[in-house]
Image (cartoon, helix red, strand yellow):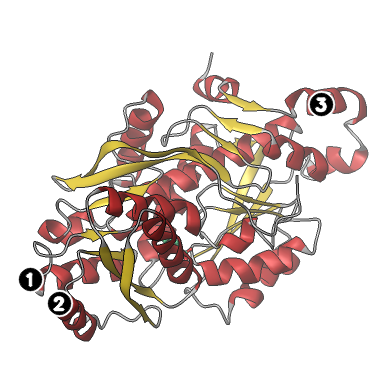
Amino acid sequence: MSKSNTTRRRFLTGAAATVGAAAATSFIPTRFAIAAKAPVRVGILLPYSGTYAMLGNSITDAMKLRIAQAGGVMGGRAVEYIAIDSEMSVPKAAQNANKLISKENVDFLVGPVHSGIAAVMAKIVGQRKTPIMIVPNAGSNDVTGGLCAPNIFRTSFSNWQAAYPGGTLMAKEGHKTCATISWKYGAGIQMMAAGRESFAKAGGKSVKDILLPFPNVEFQAHLSEIAELKPDAVFAFFSGGGATKFLKDYAAAGLKDKIPLYGPGFLTEGVEKAAGAAAEGIKTTLHYASNLDNPANKAFRAAYKTSTGNDANVFSVQGYDAGSLMLQAMAAVNGDTGATADIIASMEGSVFLDSPRGVWRMSKAHNPIQDIYVRQVAGGEQKLLGVAAPALEDPATGCKAG
Ligand code: PHB
């Protein structure tokens, strides 16, 4: 059995039987026979410049790797990628998304990284039947909450989901007070709220909540204020280049050994080497750890290293799983991108048995139900300490689906 067959067999979908039956009876209309020869069009709207460039590149590289591992075809058709640099610009988001949807006629729209852009895209895509949008990072709670729609799926996390267990961890480690610090936009606001929510539930209290304009990295004055306030701990969300700068500034301000840092794992993810000693020892919560002991993770990390020269991170895992999600759905409809309802049904019932992050399944709101781990940076890697929240599901507040 070939590698891709093995993988496909290990990817369950609740709708597989139904889709298979439909395929046997009603397929092969002329429209499909002609379209079958054309490549599947995958639009990508991700950041390739600025503070989140590493995230966009990790997602793209891993998604392409996954599809290359399946022979570069989805449902028997070649794949064409049409990528736009989001520049992390919310004002340009609608124009960029519309370009991919209306001008480039993409079948799948993969993106974004940034919660603010995600909300703009979800409003546009959710009002249409096509394309199928797959969010490979942005955690905006609304995308699988109030803005949820049949044709919007996420292979990453919700902001609540990644941050809530972090507040619990901080309390469990004996801390009673904290300060929170992040960027003032959807992701930072929602993650800090979730961290405070679980911290308060465990008896903790935030004494100061600091928000900087995105993607500002002028941390000095805020670090001085934190040093004066002396909370037991600091809960932070930054990511990419901004996270590296924050970790370095935090250590340089002499705070690292005095006031332990916590947060959703993006704070240290993919920046372990760049931040060096400033990241060592920091404990965070996330749906991935680099040394997760499952065969899929080991094979993925080795293949990713060979093909990109880089170490895999959570962003690449999310991109890899976006590739898997499209592959299995396209296989289920034999490459018929017009069979939208069947593609959606296939994605809705999906259970990922071979994800590098461990087993996860798609919720009714189209967000992963997944284990959230406790990790610690040691020797430049994210080492697993335990499971903070098994099979955690986002509450999907406001989503009428399911
Ligand atoms: C987001 O904007 O939703 C976001 C960005 C970077 C991360 C996580 C979430 O690392």
Considering only vertical position in the picture, is 255 above or below 324?
below
Label 3: how many Cα within 10 Å (few below 14, some 14–19, many 20+): few
Which label is found at residue 227?
Answer: 2
Q: Amino acid at mark 3?
A: Thr
Q: Amino acid at mark 1?
A: Gly
Residue 393, image quadrant: top right
Give yes or no for contact between labels 2 and 1 (Cβ–Cβ under 8 Å).
yes
Which label is found at residue 18?
Answer: 3
Q: Earlier in the sequence, mark 2 or mark 3?
A: 3
Label 1: how many Cα within 10 Å (few below 14, some 14–19, many 20+): few
Asked whether mark 3 and ligand 1 are closer than 8 Å, the reply comes as no
Q: Which residue is mark 1?
A: 254
Q: Is residue 76 visible?
A: no
Where is residue 46? Give x, y as percent.
50, 63
Label 2: how many Cα within 10 Å (few below 14, some 14–19, many 20+): some
Of discs 2 and 3, which sits in the foreground?
2
Which label is found at residue 341?
Answer: none
Give yes or no for contact between labels 1 and 3 (Cβ–Cβ under 8 Å).
no
Asked whether mark 1 and ligand 1 are closer than 8 Å, the reply comes as no
